[in-house]
Image (cartoon, grey):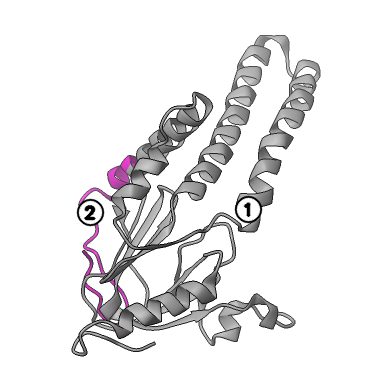
Amino acid sequence: MGVMTDGLSPHAPPRFLVADRLAGTARAQRWMWSETFCKWLRRPLPSAQYARRLGEGQRFALRRGSWMSVLVPMVVFTQFVDVLIAQGVIHVAVAPAHRAVAHGLLLFASVWMVAWAVSLRSATQHIDHVLGAHTLTLAIGFNQLCRLPLATIISVRAIDHRAVRGNDDWHDVHQLKPRDVTVLSPLDKPTLLIELAAGANGASWTRNGSPRPLKRWVAVYVDQPDAMRAAVVAAIAELPSSAARQP
């Protein structure tokens, strides 16, 4: 677990940073292809098993975001259309000696995009955020996992994107700088903002299994931010008075 000071959790960097990042990328690819093949072959999904390992508690879904509900299916559909057009262009524009390689690379890229979209949507449909008795676990598919002890949470607020005006964005609405916020939702706009106590212990964040530094503020997407906020507030109120911090 990371130890937070001044609102950051300064994990000691790995001795071999490049190797650690490459290992994380390899894990992400393994998760992606495993989820996709199990989905297509109608076998038990790795994401369902992973979700059970997150522990018991109230679960809050994140499957209705614009990427998950609309854009990811569009990626799958457009790949089947675009790849036919691109293959035709290669047949006309590429020299015969290089056509086989170009066709193969394009086909692999298209299959990879479809697998990425299928696995991302499937994992998001099965993996939820989990509010336990003492810890809030924020999970974005297989790739990102953030564990926040409830005693380290100072405030929880919903992000209202409708309040944005002109050139402002949600950071401006909440008087924050992007550099001060860990955004866990890589595609969908975050809907919940969590403030952590400076110097708190036990908060951690990993991406593809590799630890990352955690900022003072954490922003994440959830389908029902108001319901999740109310549940977190209630859970903090039930902590022993010496540990609880009322949002």
Which SS class for mark 2?
Answer: loop
Q: Which of marks 1 and 2 is nearer the N terminus?
A: 2
Q: Which residue is drawn at 63% across and 23% down?
A: 107
Residue density around tag 2, few if under 14, some if 14–19, many if 20 or more, within 10 Å = few
Which SS class for mark 1?
Answer: helix
Q: Is the magenta stretch mostly helix, strand or loop?
A: loop
When asked about the image quadrant of residue 72, the answer is top right
Q: Which residue is drawn at 57% across and 77% down?
A: 159
Which range is magenta?
1-23
Residue density around tag 1, few if under 14, some if 14–19, many if 20 or more, within 10 Å = some
Where the C terminus falls, by quadrant? bottom left
Residue 217 visible (yes or no): no
- Counting from the top left corner in percent of width and height, residue 175 is at 54, 87
- Counting from the top left corner in percent of width and height, residue 15 is at 20, 52
The amino acid sitting under disc 1 is: Trp
Relative to 49, is 3 above or below? below
Mark 1 lies on residue: 67
Q: Is residue 196 left or right of residue 101?
A: left
When asked about the image quadrant of residue 240, the answer is bottom left
Mark 2 lies on residue: 14
Q: Is residue 7 magenta?
A: yes
The amino acid sitting under disc 2 is: Pro
- Counting from the top left corner in percent of width and height, residue 84 is at 76, 23
Q: Is residue 169 magenta?
A: no
Where the N terminus falls, by quadrant? bottom left
Q: Residue at x 39, y 34 (%)?
A: 30
